[in-house]
């Protein structure tokens, strides 16, 4: 089930990139395009929480985390703005190829060291080969 959710999320990202890029063009700014994307997402989440009768008191736990955990939202905004800028210039496949390769490289490092509380998974040759294959795929997409 989790693999299907990951596949579904992966399919949505290129679609989101195309839609957000068009919004960015229409408003003549990747920052405004990102703002619109986040506003629509926020409204959607609020509607979901109302419809599912979410326990609003649970949100207090987020305020007990160290300040740097709150940077996650800002990182998401930078990512969406970058996708809005890159997609019309590089195309969807190359944009996501590069970002996925970077995510995998940094993800392997995060797993290895257990940064931010993620479970530790040591770097090994199979992981290095997997990341190398992704980089090779990006090079092929770029070349052809």
Image: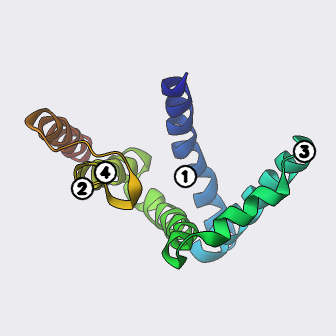
> Of the residues under marks 4 and 1, which one precedes in the sequence?
1
Q: Position of residue 29 (x, y in %)?
A: 61, 76
Q: Position of residue 44 (x, y in %)?
A: 80, 52
Asked where in the image residue 46 lies, by quadrant, the reply is bottom right
> Of the residues under marks 2 and 1, which one precedes in the sequence?
1
Disc number placed over residue 113 in the picture, else none: 2
Q: Position of residue 16 (x, y in %)?
A: 60, 49
Would you say the residues marked 4 and 1 are in contact, meaning their CB atoms lie under 8 Å apart?
Answer: no
Please tell me whether mark 4 sits on a helix, a strand or a loop: helix
In the drawing, does residue 131 fall left or right of residue 80?
A: left
Would you say the residues marked 2 and 4 are in contact, meaning their CB atoms lie under 8 Å apart?
Answer: no
Q: CA distance from mark 3 to mark 1?
A: 31 Å
Q: CA distance from mark 2 to mark 1?
A: 31 Å
Q: Which residue is mark 3?
A: 53
Instruction: Please tell me which residue lies in front, 21 or 9.
Output: 9
Q: CA distance from mark 3 to mark 2?
A: 38 Å
**Foreground: disc 2 or disc 1:** 2
Q: Considering the image in quadrants, where does the C terminus appear?
A: top left
Q: Which residue is mark 4?
A: 107
Q: Which residue is mark 1?
A: 17
């Amino acid at each position: 089930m989790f693999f299907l959710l990951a596949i579904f999320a992966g399919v949505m990202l290129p679609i989101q990139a195309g839609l957000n890029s068009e919004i960015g063009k229409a408003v003549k700014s990747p920052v405004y395009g990102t703002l619109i994307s986040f506003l629509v997402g926020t409204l959607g989440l609020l509607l979901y929480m109302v419809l599912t009768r979410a326990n609003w008191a649970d949100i207090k736990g987020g305020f007990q985390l160290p300040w740097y955990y709150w940077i996650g939202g800002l990182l998401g905004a930078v990512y969406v703005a970058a996708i809005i800028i890159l997609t019309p210039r590089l195309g969807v496949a190359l944009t996501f190829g590069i970002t996925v390769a970077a995510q995998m490289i940094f993800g392997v490092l995060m797993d290895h060291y257990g940064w931010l509380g993620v479970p530790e998974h040591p770097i090994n040759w199979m992981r290095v080969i997997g990341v190398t294959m992704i980089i090779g795929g990006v090079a092929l997409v770029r070349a052809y």
